[in-house]
Image: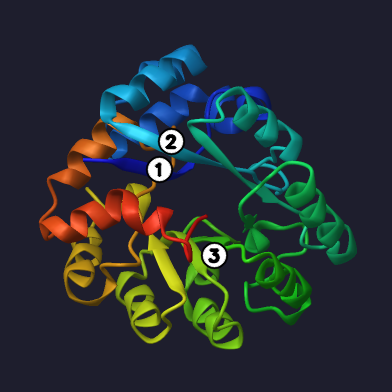
Amino acid sequence: MRVLDIRLRPPSRGFLAQHLYTQHERTAELIRGLGMEPPASLRERSMERLLAEMAAAGVERAVVVGRHAPAPWGGVTNDDVAAIVREHPDLFLGIGSVDVCDVAGALREIDRTDHELGFVGLAIDSTNAREPMLPDDRRLAPLYERCLALDWPLVVTMSHQVGSDIGWGHPVSIDRMAAQWPALPIVVAHASWPYVREALAVAHRRPNVYLVPDIYLPTMPGGIEYVQAANLFLGDRLIFGSTYPIGPHADMVRLCAALPFRPDVRDKFFYDNASARRALP
């Protein structure tokens, strides 16, 4: 079984300054709360360990996703992401991030990450920005236009953890956004958990919406409904992501492989959907 991980944060460069690594005991508690075991690579903050864990789990490719957000989330520069990709070009792809509150600067940075850094998409955390915005905010329209021009997917993080209350994670804004930008592939990290059925309804009516339920898929309440949807109508648009280090590769691959996917859908989920041109180059 081939595995492509569409979302991880490796123990390298700017990621090591994020709370996931600086407060690794708290991160370990979060992992145990998901019914998984904290990996040695987290405890040791070791890139070498991570690479070994990925190989043991059968992960062939992975996407390093940048983040531009204030504390406590913290950011990772696009140059750091690019450096990690350059160090492991056969394993990693890069997706950049921008300051969504500075649209002109964001457009310049998108062009730079395309021309100079070779990135393959854009990730936004607009609900956690210094001026929080829902993804369908019209101020973000120029960024989406640029993604369309570059034929890039857009990764949007949506869950109960984004914004000042859980309402910010409701996928109605994704529905509106997908309607406004029907040609833009929208990849929803965390798949708007716990709004599972609402997210599935959005994906059912918007063919440009892809869901990445990541850590919420194998063990959390409602996760099985993503699988049921994949076996019915979402087989080409449900994507595997570990959200490492919160989702250790050994446990994530093992637990997700045990879910009742149809065999053909399982292969798409673990690799083909992310590698398909409209989800990820």
Hey, which quadrant is residue 179 in on the image? bottom right
Q: Quadrant of residue 141?
A: bottom right
Cα separation between marks 3 and 1: 28 Å
The disc labelled 3 sits on which kind of residue?
Asp
* Residue positioned 42% across, 21% down in the render: 51
Residue beneath label 1, please?
5
The reply, left or right, for residue 160 in relation to residue 193 is: right
Pointer 2: what residue?
Answer: 244
Q: Is residue 42 above or below residue 35?
A: above
Q: Which amino acid type corresponds to the residue marked 2 in the rendered image?
A: Tyr
Q: Quadrant of residue 207?
A: bottom left
Q: Say whether marks 1 and 2 touch (CB < 8 Å).
A: yes
The quarter of the rendered structure image containing the N terminus is: top left
> Of callouts 3 and 1, which one flags the residue occurring earlier in the amino acid sequence?
1
Tell which tag, 2 or 3, sits nearer the viewer.
2
- As helix, strand or loop, the secondary structure at mark 2 comes to loop
Q: Answer yes or no: do the residues labelled 2 and 3 have beta carbons within 8 Å?
A: no
